[in-house]
Structure formats: structure tokens, C-alpha cells
């Protein structure tokens, strides 16, 4: 039997507004820091952050399966934010282009719904659950912002298509699990109990179709400016898969970029260096 919640976070209460302000401040500060700091230091910091978040995500997932915390409707990692909690750290560590594009699209859109209209119930330990919820969802906004606007990792139209296909695939998995278990992960089988953006899209199942269209249009609008600018600048694609283009800001003081052509990420590549070889480790260490 599912235990009754100890409490619920008030949407747009003092705690919620405070966390939103913190997310915005961290996003702006870290984007500016990543643009002004040597790429080697940023690269190292993001990899460390990836390992920290991955260990935390695994431990939190195990916590959800403990007898005192088990809840069929909450403990299974089937929300998009649950998948993002694992995918984003892996993207920071492994630098696979498909992981990066999916994590960025999910983090800045699907995850944003849980940031703006959170559905948070506390079941065991209020401070711990509050911290874990906002660590996962806050990092899901801040780190994609750093990757896109700080490091200049721009999704291509092919990246858009791969991310959308991954979204449909995960939705089908969660929807099937909901039918079998009577759960409502990703809010695919009924709307959440509290107010949400889905309320603007009509009743279930209508809002599923509307949401699919809104996601496609929203992601296209997110991709379009990058595609236009990168095409005009001739920004090279990262890796053979063509899911990303990398156009990092120029850092004349960065010794690693002056001495190693592989750190040249924009169109201002050193003479004699081909565009395909002028990408950072975000492309150099990644496969399809």
C-alpha cells in the first residue's frame, strides 16, 4: 500500500520562488564563467560534475527501492526527469552527441515543466526529498544552458530528429508501464493532481497530441536560430553523426587552444587545420 504523503510543496510559494531565482542566477553565472574560463578547466569541472551527479542519481534511485521509501507511483525511474537524471551526467562524462542533444532538449523543455509547475509530495524525509528534487531538476536546466550558450554546443536538425525520436520512444515505454501498473509516470495516462502546463492543452488524451505538437514546434524554434547562424558562419559539425555543431567563444589567453588545434571549436581554426579536426573533446571523444 502506498503511504500517505507527509506534505506537499506549494507551487509559487516562498520555497519555489527562491529555488527559481537560484536556478536563473546559477544559469547566468555559469554560462558567463564557462565563456570566460580556459576550456580545459571548464571541461574538467563538467566531468567532475557529471560524476557527482551520476553517483547521486544512482544512490537516490536505490533509496527509492528501500522498504521505507518504496512507492509504486514514485519510485520507478520512468519520468522524463528520471531518465534525464542519468542521461545528463553520462553526457558530461562520455560526451556522446546523442546524449548531449537529448539531454539539452529534455532539460530545457520537458524538465522545465517540472521546474515551473512542480508536483512535489514528501513521503519520508522532507529536507532530503526537497534537495534531491531540485538538484535533479535544477541541474537539468543549468547544465544544458552551459553546454549550449557557454560551450557553444548547438543541436542540428539531425540532432532535433534524434532527440524527438528518443522522446517518443521513452513515452511509449512509460505509457506501457502505466497501463500495466496503474501508474501515471510522465503524466501520460492522466493529468497530474496539481496545476500544470498540461491544463492549457485540454483533457486527456487530447493533451498528449497537443503536447507532441507543441514539443515539435518548440524544439524547431529552439533549433532554427542555431541552424541559421551556424550555416552562415560555416560552423563544422562535431563527429560523423552530425548531431551537433561546436562554435565556442574565442579565448586568446587559453594556452590549450593556442597550442592544440583540437581545442579550436569555431570557424577561426588555425591555418592548415581541417574543419572536421577542429573540434573539442566534446566531439573528439564521442561516437554516433
Image (tube, helix red, strand yellow):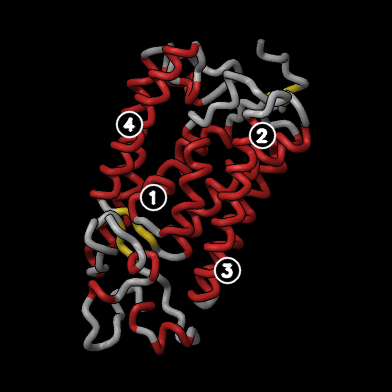
Q: Tell which circle, 1 or 4, labels the residue nearer the N-terminal end.
A: 1
**Element type where label 1 sits in the image:** helix
Task: Measuring from the top left, give residue 53's x and y in whole percent.
Answer: 59, 51
In 3D space, how far apart are the residues under numbered discs 3 and 1 (Cα atoms)? 23 Å
Q: Tell which circle, 2 or 4, labels the residue nearer the N-terminal end.
A: 2
> Above or below — where is 238 with respect to 11?
below
Q: Residues within 10 Å of mark 3 (few under 14, many from 20)?
A: some
Please say if the residues under marks 4 and 3 sit with CB atoms less than 8 Å apart.
no
In 3D space, how far apart are the residues under numbered discs 2 and 1 (Cα atoms)? 25 Å
- Mark 2 or 4: in front is 2
Q: Tell which circle, 3 or 1, labels the residue nearer the N-terminal end.
A: 3
Residue found at x 64% / y 37%: 133
In 3D space, how far apart are the residues under numbered discs 3 and 2 (Cα atoms)? 34 Å
In 3D space, how far apart are the residues under numbered discs 2 and 4 (Cα atoms)? 26 Å
- Mark 4 or 3: in front is 4
Residue matched to label 2: 63
Amino acid at each position: 500500500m502506498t503511504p500517505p504523503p507527509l506534505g506537499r510543496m506549494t507551487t509559487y510559494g516562498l520555497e519555489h520562488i527562491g529555488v527559481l531565482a537560484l536556478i536563473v542566477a546559477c544559469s547566468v553565472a555559469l554560462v558567463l564563467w564557462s565563456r570566460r574560463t580556459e576550456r580545459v578547466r571548464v571541461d574538467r569541472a563538467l566531468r567532475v560534475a557529471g560524476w557527482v551527479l551520476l553517483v547521486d542519481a544512482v544512490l537516490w534511485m536505490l533509496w527509492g527501492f528501500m522498504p521505507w521509501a518504496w512507492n509504486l507511483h514514485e519510485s520507478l525511474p520512468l519520468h522524463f526527469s528520471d531518465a534525464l537524471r542519468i542521461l545528463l551526467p553520462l553526457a558530461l562524462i562520455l560526451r556522446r552527441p546523442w546524449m548531449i542533444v537529448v539531454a539539452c532538449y529534455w532539460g530545457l523543455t520537458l524538465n522545465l515543466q517540472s521546474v515551473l509547475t512542480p508536483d512535489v509530495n514528501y513521503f519520508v524525509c522532507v529536507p532530503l526529498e526537497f534537495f534531491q528534487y531540485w538538484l535533479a531538476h535544477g541541474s537539468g536546466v543549468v547544465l544544458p544552458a552551459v553546454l549550449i550558450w557557454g560551450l557553444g554546443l548547438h543541436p542540428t536538425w539531425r540532432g532535433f530528429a534524434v532527440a524527438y525520436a528518443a522522446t517518443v520512444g521513452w513515452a511509449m515505454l512509460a505509457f506501457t508501464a502505466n497501463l500495466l501498473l496503474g501508474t501515471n509516470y510522465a503524466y501520460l495516462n492522466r493529468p497530474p493532481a496539481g496545476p500544470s502546463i498540461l491544463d492549457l492543452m485540454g483533457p486527456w488524451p487530447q493533451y498528449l497530441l497537443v503536447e507532441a505538437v507543441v514539443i515539435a514546434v518548440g524544439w524547431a524554434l529552439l533549433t532554427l536560430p542555431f541552424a541559421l547562424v551556424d550555416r552562415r558562419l560555416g560552423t563544422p559539425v562535431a563527429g560523423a553523426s552530425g548531431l551537433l555543431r561546436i562554435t565556442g567563444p574565442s579565448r586568446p589567453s587559453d594556452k590549450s587552444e593556442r597550442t592544440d588545434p583540437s581545442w579550436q571549436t569555431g570557424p577561426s581554426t588555425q591555418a592548415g587545420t581541417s574543419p572536421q579536426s577542429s573540434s573539442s573533446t566534446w566531439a573528439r571523444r564521442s561516437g554516433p
